[in-house]
Each structure stands twice: as C-alpha cells, then as structure tokens.
Image (cartoon, grey):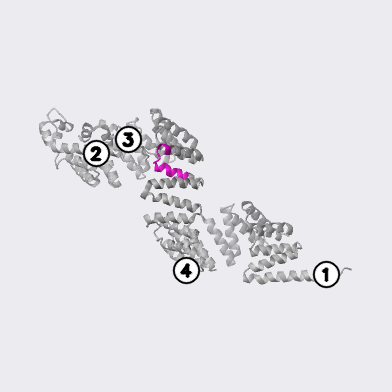
C-alpha cells in the first residue's frame, strides 16, 4: 500500500523550516503551489495507486505550466545580471541581508556558480532532458557539496534514471547534511524500501515520525512495510492513528480496507473501503478495489454491478471493461466476456493485441478452435517474437486436428522462450503419435541438454523410453525428474510402474507406498498398490481396503471397479466379484484384462456360455503373447459344455 498521487498535493515537507542556501527559496518565491508540487514530487516504490484526475485534470495543463516555467527561467537568465546589479525585484529570492551588507548570494549566476547549474538542471528536467539535468545537478553539487537540497534533487534524478546506487549515495549524504529534514529522510527510506532493505526503511520512516508526528506520508509507507513483514497489528495501528488524526480524509480508510483485504478479512475490507467511498464517492480507484474485494469474497454479482456502474459513467474506461471481461471468464460466462472484450478491442484499435489474445483464449476454452486460431494469428502478426502466443497457436492447431501446422509452431519456439519445455513436449508427442518414436526421443534429449533443470522434460523423456521398453533409461530419467521437482508424487508413481514392468516387484510396492504416504487420497496409487497385492494373491484384506478407498474417490472408474472385483474374486466372493466386474466392463467395454476377469467370474458362478463369450472378446483384444492362455480357457470351457452328461443311476 503506497501513497496515492492525490496525497502529493497535500504534501508540506517540514524540512522547509530549515532552508539551506537559496535553492528552495528560489522556488518558493517564484512559483505557485502547484509547481512546487511538481518540483517536490516524491519518487515512490513500485505499485503506487494513482488518482491523477484530482491532481491534474489534463496533460495540457501540465504542459502549459511547464512552458510558463521555462519562459520564466529564460527571462530570469537574460535579465538576472542587470537586475542583480540594480538590486531589482528578481534578485530578491537570492538575497540574504546581513549587518555587513549584501551576502554572497547576490552574485549573478554564471558557469562557475552552483546556482547557474541549478537553474540549468531545473530547466532541463522540465523539458524532459534527464541526462542533461543530471549533468547540471552533478556540477552544482561539486560546486556546493554542502547543499542537502541539491543532493536530494540529484538523488531523485538518479532514481528516475534507474541509477539506484548513486541515488542511495546522494540520499545518505543529504541526510548527513540535514538529519532533521523529512524530505531527505523520506527519499532515503523510499530507496531502502525499493532495494528491499526493509529494516533500514522502517527505522528511517520511524525517525521521520519522531521529527514530525503529524505527517501522514511516512505513516502510510511504514504501515505497508509492517504489513509486508507480517506485522499486521502495527500496520493497522498506524492507519487507525491516521484516521483518528484525519477523520475526514478517505486515505486512511482506503488503505486500512486494502490491508484487511490482504489478510483475507474481506468483510472488514468492504466496511472500510465503503467508508472511504462515502468520503470520496467519485473515486474510481476505491470502487475498483471494492469490486475486487467482492470478487475475492465470492460475491461476483456485486462486483459486476460496480464494474457496470463505472462503465455507465465512463464507457471508455478500458481497465474496467477488461476487468469485467475477466470476471465473466472466471464464471465461465464466455459469451458475455466476449461481448466486453470485443468492445474493448474496438476501442483499443491497433494497440488491442492483448484483447485479441484474451478473446482467442476464450474461444480455446469454448473449443471453438478455428476462431481461436484466427485471434492468435492476429496477435502473432503484430508480435512475431511472442513465443507464448505461438505456443497457444500450436495448441489450437493440435486440438483442431491440424497436426502439421501445430508441429510447425512448436518447432519455432526457441530454447530461451518461457514455453520452450511445453512446446518440446508437444512436438515430441506429435512425433510419437506418427510412429516416429526415435525422433521424438531425440527431440527430448536435445531439450534436456538445453534445460537440464526442467523436471517435466525429464519426466516426458522417461515416458518415451518406457514406450520403447528401455526401462533402465526410463528409470534414470524419472529419477532425474524427481531430483528437480517440487511435486514428487507424480514421478514416484511413474517410477513404481517402471519397477513393476522391469520385474522389481518389491521396489515397485515400496515406491507406491511412498506415494500413498505423500498423497493419501491418490486413487490411482491406492488402486495400483491394492491390485498388485490382489494379482499376486498377497495381503488381500489390505488390498480390499486400499481399493475400496480408491472406489470412494473415483466411483465411476472402470479400472478401479475391476480391481475391486478381482480382489473379491481372489477371496472367493465370486457373486460379489461378478457384480463389480459387470459394472467395470460397462464402463470399459474393450479392455482385455477386464474381459478375462469377467470370464473367470462367470466360470466360477456356473455361467459357462457367458464365460466363453467374455473370453472370446478378451482374446480378440489381447496382446499376441496372452492369446494362447485365453484360448486354453476357451477350449476347456467348450469341452465342458459339450461333454456328454453322465447317466443318472
């Protein structure tokens, strides 16, 4: 939470009570309050909420004021020597009368004089010539190194130019020269905060409040630092003190509302943002934050009402229209979202590529892939180096069945792109789908050479090795993924499956137990472990418990229902087993393992003809190496069916 622009108008730095040199009096004597605000404006840290409408109604006014100021400086520079000699009115801001006569400040500014460079730097800053302004102020500081005001001004220019270290150096020097000057202390504290020197920033803001307890600015910044450090009680106390001192100001209520929102106390946030709105009913910033809190609270309809209210007052507010579109997207009200975003796109014109991107993503979510492709192509034409958009385009082509176009998109994503890993995985997938497994593996091997830190690349490479039945390589790749991941369970599951396929049964069981320990509600791991026990005829009671828990988590999963039927079969509960196996085959009608299990259950319950039918279907779907075993079961049953019955005695 940072100081809004509107508060800058109210700023009256108490350090003015200790004027050092004539620089500040030059400003005070020559320019009105609004220009003083421009000169003294504080460079704040990132994230500040601005309410510029109350500070400057139009950019034209700012430009006009700057032009007037430059003209005044020009007149000053031209007439200063004569005025100074005559003791004219323009020389008065520089004068310090003493008992012994005119002071040194009456001398005219010239290239050897700090005031000359002060004027030059000030003028260059107003014209937007930042490097020229910095050079002039640097020369002024060299000529007058004991001026805290010059050093503060130079530090601000360094900040604006991104020269943080130099800004910090000058700000510290200014505080050493004027330790009671709040403007210097505030600047130093702001730099500390911006460079993540939180403790130093807190101490400096606290020092400002000791010097002048009436100042609200350091209280706001200090509360934000306390909040960032998790000291919410202190942060709330500062803002409550601010409200007590200025009960008619919306600022304290506004930031207290935001602070409560940060803590997830949305009811309190709504209360204080509402009070801020009562004091500043036309504030778009407060309304926007209030709408955002309603979103977080789950009251999306109230948020939508506020956004619509803002759009009625200002239909051209692109930020609000964009936010409204995002709310509609979050509610999956895609048609309404598209309406807002299309309006936004028409208003944004050539600069509306982000809008086209959002529209494309909505079409993608709606599975209208042809329309998504059109939108992504528009964005990519304007931003040909945006590889994330190229990735989205490739994904849309893939979903639309245009595999060659998708492959072309994924191939063009370079290693330095944020979406490189995902693009390589999709490319490898497309190659493996067309029986080009070796090329697919080569793509992934190249990808892990570029980005060995990416766990998902190692994970997919392991999957491809598994398809090629190179289990040792697959295990090695999965272990590398495990070393790099923050989510080990998914890779441990793959590792357990690989150990099972390699014939390392105990290692597979041990790994699956680890998965269940990490994720007790992992239905697939529960099922795999339980089925392994059942298939081997061991720990059948535990197997049943594991599988029944998996069924609770995934009641419509045919494979898990098959596992339950099979563990019951193994325990001799053939009728109950048949019930679950029939449910399983209804969900997965073509799985040869489930069909064989179903045949076994029919055979045990005496339904021999049904068993033969199930076995025949299983034989059609089974792998070559399993067909002979199923064929023996069929022949055995057929011989039993057609065997002559024994005569009764």
> Residue under circle 3?
55
Query: Which label sits on residue 72?
Result: none
- Residue shown at the point (45%, 50%) measured from the top left: 359
Q: Tell which tag, 4 or 3, sits nearer the viewer.
A: 3
Question: Is 545 above or below relative to 221?
Answer: below
Question: Is 507 above or below relative to 177?
Answer: below
| Distance Cα–Cα, label 4 vs label 3 | 63 Å
> Residue under circle 2?
66
Q: Is residue 190 left or right of residue 268?
A: left
| Distance Cα–Cα, label 3 vs label 1 | 105 Å
- Closer to the chain start, of discs 3 and 1, is 3
Q: Is residue 645 left or right of residue 494?
A: right
Say whether marks 4 and 3 touch (CB < 8 Å): no
Query: Quarter-wise, where is residue 183 in the image?
Result: top left
Residue 472 coordinates in the image, percent (x, y): 53, 67
Question: Is 151 above or below relative to 470?
Answer: above
> Residue under circle 1?
645
Q: Quadrant of the N terminus?
A: top left
Q: Is residue 493 left or right of residue 418?
A: right
> Residue under circle 4?
439
Residue 61 coordinates in the image, percent (x, y): 28, 37
């Amino acid at each position: 939470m940072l100081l809004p622009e509107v508060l800058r108008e109210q700023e009256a730095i108490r350090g003015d009570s200790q004027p050092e040199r004539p620089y500040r009096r030059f400003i005070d004597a020559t320019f009105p309050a609004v220009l003083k605000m421009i000169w003294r404006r504080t460079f704040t840290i990132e994230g500040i909420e601005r309410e510029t409408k109350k500070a400057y109604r139009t950019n034209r006014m700012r430009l006009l004021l700057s032009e007037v100021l430059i003209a005044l400086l020009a007149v000053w520079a031209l007439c200063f020597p004569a005025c100074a000699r005559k003791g004219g009115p323009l020389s008065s801001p520089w004068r310090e009368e003493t008992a012994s006569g005119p002071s040194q400040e009456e001398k005219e500014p010239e290239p050897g004089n700090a005031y000359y460079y002060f004027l030059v730097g000030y003028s260059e800053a107003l014209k937007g010539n930042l490097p020229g302004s910095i050079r002039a102020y640097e020369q002024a500081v060299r000529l007058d190194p004991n001026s805290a005001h010059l050093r503060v001004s130079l530090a601000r220019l360094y900040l604006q130019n991104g020269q943080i270290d130099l800004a910090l150096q000058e700000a510290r020097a200014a505080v050493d020269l004027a330790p009671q000057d709040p403007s210097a202390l505030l600047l130093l504290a702001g730099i500390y905060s911006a460079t993540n020197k939180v403790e130093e920033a807190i101490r400096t803001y606290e020092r400002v409040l000791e010097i002048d307890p009436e100042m609200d600015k350091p209280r706001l910044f200090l509360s934000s630092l306390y909040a960032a450090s998790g000291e919410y009680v202190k942060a709330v106390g500062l803002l409550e003190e601010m409200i007590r001192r200025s009960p008619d100001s919306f600022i304290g209520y506004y930031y207290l509302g935001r602070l409560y929102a940060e803590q997830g106390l949305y009811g309190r946030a709504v209360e204080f943002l509402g009070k801020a709105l009562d004091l500043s009913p036309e504030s778009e910033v407060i309304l926007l934050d209030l709408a955002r809190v309603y979103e977080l609270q789950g009251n999306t309809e109230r948020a939508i009402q506020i956004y619509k209210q803002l759009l009625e007052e200002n239909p051209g507010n692109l930020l609000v229209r964009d936010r409204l579109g995002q709310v509609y997207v979050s509610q999956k009200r895609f048609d309404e979202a598209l309406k807002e975003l299309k309006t936004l796109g028409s208003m944004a014109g050539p600069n509306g590529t982000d809008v086209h991107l959002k529209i494309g993503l909505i079409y993608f979510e709606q599975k209208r892939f042809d329309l998504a492709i059109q939108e992504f192509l528009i964005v990519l034409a304007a931003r040909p180096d945006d590889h994330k958009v190229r990735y989205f385009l490739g994904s849309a082509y893939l979903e639309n069945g245009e595999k060659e176009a998708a492959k072309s998109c994924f191939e063009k994503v370079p290693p330095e792109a944020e979406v490189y890993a995902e693009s390589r995985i999709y490319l490898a997938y497309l190659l493996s789908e067309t029986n080009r497994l070796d090329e697919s593996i080569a793509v992934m091997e190249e990808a892990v050479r570029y980005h060995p830190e990416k766990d998902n690349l190692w994970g997919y490479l392991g999957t491809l090795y598994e398809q090629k039945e190179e289990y040792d390589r697959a295990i090695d790749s999965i272990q590398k993924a495990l070393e790099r991941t923050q989510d080990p369970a998914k890779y441990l599951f793959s590792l357990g499956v690989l150990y099972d396929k390699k014939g390392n049964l105990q290692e597979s069981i041990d790994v699956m137990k680890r998965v269940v320990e990490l994720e007790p509600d992992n239905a697939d791991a529960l099922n795999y472990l339980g089925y392994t026990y059942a298939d081997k005829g061991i720990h059948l009671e535990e197997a049943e418990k594991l599988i029944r828990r998996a069924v609770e988590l995934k009641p419509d999963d045919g494979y898990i229902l098959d596992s339950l039927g099979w563990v019951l079969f193994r325990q001799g509960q053939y009728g109950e087993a048949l019930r679950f196996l029939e449910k399983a085959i209804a969900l997965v009608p073509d799985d040869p393992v489930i069909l064989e299990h179903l045949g076994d259950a029919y055979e045990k319950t005496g339904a021999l003809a049904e068993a033969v039918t199930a076995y025949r279907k299983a034989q059609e779907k089974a792998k070559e190496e399993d067909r002979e075993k199923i064929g023996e079961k069929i022949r055995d049953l057929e011989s039993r069916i057609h065997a002559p019955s024994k005569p009764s005695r």
